[in-house]
Structure formats: C-alpha cells, structure tokens
Image (tube, rainbow, N blue to C red):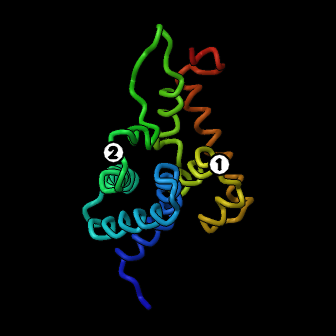
Amino acid sequence: MLFSKKDRAFRKSYSDFYPLILNALYSRVVNREDAEDICHEIFVNYYRKFDEVRDARSWLFGAMKFCISNYYRNKEGSDPDSVDISNIEDDIHLAFENGFRDVRIVIHEAIENSENYRDEEERILFDLIAINNYTYEEAATHLGITKRQAHYRYQQVSRRILEHLKERGITRIEDLL
C-alpha cells in the first residue's frame, strides 16, 4: 500500500507525539480508556488540519487543553473549574519572587530552546526520559531506535542544554538564585 506524502508525514508525527499526548492526558484524566479516546479525537482532528498546522507540538498541546476542558465540562458530576490545565505544558509564568529568579523559568527556557535539539525526535526523546520518566529502553522502543542510541542522543541533548545554561552565565546552582 502506497501512502501519500501527507500520510507519511502524519504517521511520523503521530509516532513522535502519541506517547507524549497520551501520557499527559492520562495524568489529567486518570482513566486510561478516556485518555485513549481523547487522544484518538485529538489525532483525528490533527489529521484533518494537518496541512494548516505549522507547529505540531503547539497545536497538539493546545488541542489537548481544549479536549480536557470539554471532558470535564461534559463529565457528569464534575466541576470543570476545579481542574487545573494551565500548566499542562509546564506553562510557567514569568515572575520574580523576593528578588530571586524562578528556577523553573530558566530551566524551562533551556529545555524549550529549539537550538538544543537537532530534530523533533531528539526533543521527544528528551521529553520521554527527562519529563515522563521513561527508561532509555522504553523511549527507544517508542522511537524505533536502539537503547544505546537513545542513551547517546539523550546525553547529547543534555550536554547542549547545560551549554545553553552556561551561555546564560549559569554554572552553579547558586547562579539560579
């Protein structure tokens, strides 16, 4: 069976983002079947809008926020206002408290800087291991690479992120305060 260029691109994007979206959904919904249903809905809509989407990651996380909101709005007996989805992507508000920089802001900026990743697969690998606590083996399986490749690429990304922090004058924990 031959797939169109769009279908191949979508399949790649799907395999890259599905584990992240499903895990983020599951952490908010706490019901595996509901999380899978919502994830399916998100990716069906993503396929429909695929040609219009410029940044897959942003679009998918935005759609996820919308779907989680709808889920709790439509769920019988739940209060949609009681569910905090504002930090679903670790959305960090730029703020200073008592004259100290918020460490999360600096780390978030370093992690989100696209220059620290050679491609989207490296970003996903880092997210799976560092943020979602996947093992190298589990991340490698999701990405279709070897455990050794996952370990090596993760170390490369980590090194780039540390270099990014050093470029901003952060060489010690105390520099973050």
Q: Please report whichever mark, 1 or 2, sits nearer to the chain's N-terminal start.
A: 2
Which of the 4 image quarters holds residue 54? Answer: bottom left
Give the answer, above or below, for where 160 lies relative to 20.
Answer: above
Distance, label 1 to label 2, CA atoms, is 28 Å
Image quadrant holding the N terminus, namely bottom left
Against 98, residue 126 (above or below) is below
- Image spot of residue 150 (x, y percent): 68, 57
Amino acid type, mark 1: Asn
Residue under the image location 52 percent in, 38 percent down: 111
Left-right relation of 80 to 176: left
| Residue at the spot 47% in from the left edge and 8% down from the top edge | 99
- Please state, as top left, top right, bottom left or bottom right, where the C terminus lies in the image: top right
User: Hey, what amino acid is under mark 2?
Assistant: Pro
Residue at the farthest front position: 77
Q: Which mark is residue 133?
A: 1
Tell me: 173 left or right of 25: right
> Which mark is nearer the camera, 1 or 2?
2
Q: Position of residue 9 (x, y in %)?
A: 40, 70
Per the rendering, the mark at residue 80 is 2
Q: Position of 20 compared to 74: left or right?
A: right
Residue 14 appears in the figure:
yes
The reply to whether residue 119 is in sight is no
- Residue 113: percent from left, percent from top: 47, 39
Q: Are marks 1 and 2 in contact (CB under 8 Å)?
A: no
User: SS at mark 2?
Assistant: helix
Secondary structure state at the residue bearing disc 1: loop
Quarter assignment of residue 175:
top right
